[in-house]
Image (cartoon, helix red, strand yellow):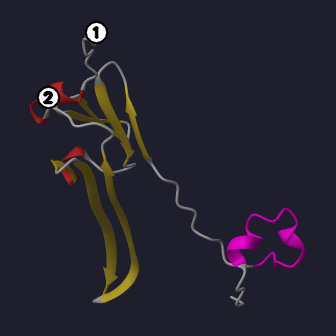
Amino acid sequence: MKYLPFRPLMDSFPFKSLWMDEDEWPELKINQGLNVFEEDNMVVVQASVPGVPADKVKVTYEGGVLRITARMEEGEETKKRGRTIHQWSKVASFDYASRLPKPIDSKSVDAEIKDGIVTVKAKVAEEAKAKEIPLRSAK
């Protein structure tokens, strides 16, 4: 692959095909698969972990940071007369960490996985909820 010092700028340029070779190696595109939002006094976090079974996913919460990690390895090897004639392996690894927008009640945390999406829901802590402050008249 040729050295292109201004590659980050070139990727957003509309006519980059004028100086880019068509036969370049494909680039790995990484999409951030994490969504964090609030809904009805709940903090909701969704993380994409496609192809990883539930027993390989770990969810932790410490110091206001929610972390979702997942790792899966698969492989196959075919040998003939002691020599490897076919081998493949697949590794999927995810590590999401996010500071939550509000403190949560750690006793109310619920996590589930469905169709490759981990969903974590927790109630906003009472001390973090908006409170109305009574206004008194100055004398």
- For residue 92, which quarter of the picture? bottom left
Q: Which sits earlier in the primary sequence, circle 2 or circle 1?
A: 2
Q: How far apart are the alpha carbons under marks 2 and 1?
A: 40 Å
Report the residue at 34% width, 76% height from top.
Answer: 78
Give coordinates of residue 101: x percent, y percent: 33, 39
Instruction: Report the side of 101 relative to 34 (left or right).
Output: left
Q: Which quadrant does the N terminus fall into? A: bottom right
Disc 1 crowd rating (10 Å Cα; few below 14, some 14-19, many 20+) is few
Q: Amino acid at mark 1?
A: Ser
Do the residues under discs 2 and 1 have CB atoms within 8 angstroms? no
10 falls in the magenta region: yes
Q: Vertically, is 82 above or below 95?
A: below
8 falls in the magenta region: yes
Region in magenta: 7-23
Disc 2 crowd rating (10 Å Cα; few below 14, some 14-19, many 20+) is few
Residue, disc 2: 108
Residue, disc 1: 137
Q: Which quadrant does the C terminus fall into? A: top left
Depth check, mark 2 against mark 1: the one in front is 1
Give coordinates of residue 80: x percent, y percent: 33, 84
Report the residue at 25% width, 18% height from top.
Answer: 131
Report the residue at 22% width, 37% height from top.
Answer: 103
In this view, the residue in front, 38 or 92, is 38
- Tally of marks: 2
